[in-house]
Amino acid sequence: MTAVGMGIPAVRSATTSVDGRPDVPELVDSFGRVARDLRVSITEKCSLRCTYCMPEEGLPAIPAEQLLTAAEIVRLVDIAVHRLGVHEVRFTGGEPLMRADLESIIQGCTTRVPGIPLAMTTNAVGLEHRARALADAGLSRVNVSLDSVDRAHFAQLTRRDRLPAVMAGIRAAVRHGLAPVKVNAVLMPETLDGAADLLDWCIDEGVALRFIEEMPLDADHAWKRGDMVSAQQVLDVLGDRFELSAIGRADPSAPAEQWLVNGGPATVGVIGSVTRSFCSDCDRTRLTAEGTVRSCLFSDRETDLRGALRGGADDDELARLWRGAMWNKWAGHGIDAAGFTPPKRSMGAIGG
């Protein structure tokens, strides 16, 4: 077992118990959930410093030799789809656009897993200049993190004055067909009053907005349950300007509850990660940028695939290790439980 920087927990070996696991290829856990949505972090680097995600100085750099290469990422995505039943892949960071070989990663996955949706979560800084190439490589759609359309508030939250670049990136994504483009806004006390303005902007731009309750995944460990803006609070604020009609979830495993805005067709989503937990329907599995499987955002258990991959393991062995990691997934994040302890990694180090 080894430990590396960035608050990374000790990486587990292949000794995790799989007692009672059914002999099925899918990523089933002991609570009967099946992971079909793969999140792949490809870097710890980011062009912004959002307060709920990263420290002001950024995360410690991962040595290049510890990052998965483009070829290794493509191979693991291939295994996830063809051997483990994954139906959708999303690339995250840090900020995926910080990798110069991002287009190669997308193109490689498009070739190996044709027909599988390939999405990306991004802050959109620089996307204006790469959206066409990413779409040509096979990227299906993007989710863009944008918490405010007030330039001063944006700069305060991200510690960077880059709002015009983000807006340009969103428009480029729409223009090049990376649709549906979704905007993710983390609910913060500083931006609650601007939530309606953000929704107005998204409707005008033809993109879908989702508000997300802030979770205790900040690098500074400043999150407090009592200071958190809840899903109900933002719905109350939006209700002062818009007529909202609840339409629920199209898919039980989808995190966002949806509302029609002023009778439609525009919608707004709210992800109540804390107050309206959806852990019982979670269908996600995660790979960190260093090649470890992380079964839950809040669990510090990680299983090393990179070491096995570079040690000569074949695809069957890598799939077996991955199944074992997911079998032991926690029932839920436990934020409201007595003695809850936030994970050692922040969101920027895990990948969204």
Image: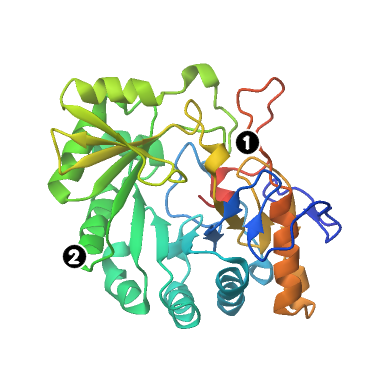
Kind of residue at badge 1 = Gly
Q: Which residue is mark 1?
A: 332
Q: Nearer the viewer, mark 1 or mark 2?
A: 1
Q: Is residue 230 visible?
A: yes
Q: Which residue is mark 2?
A: 175
Quick check: 111 left or right of 311?
left
Q: Nearer the viewer, residue 233 or 28?
A: 28
Q: Nearer the viewer, residue 270 or 24?
A: 24
Kind of residue at badge 2 = Arg
Residue 55, position as x, y percentages in the image: 54, 41
Residue 267, position as x, y percentages in the image: 23, 40
Quick check: 23 left or right of 181?
right
Tell me the quadrant of the picture where the N terminus can be found: bottom right
Q: Residue at x 37, y 70 (%)?
A: 139
Residue 200, position as x, y percentages in the image: 16, 37
Q: Can you say whether 163 is above or below 292 in the image?
A: above
In three-dimensional space, the C-alpha distance between marks 1 and 2, rounded to whole angstroms, equals 39 Å
Residue furthest out toward the bottom: 111
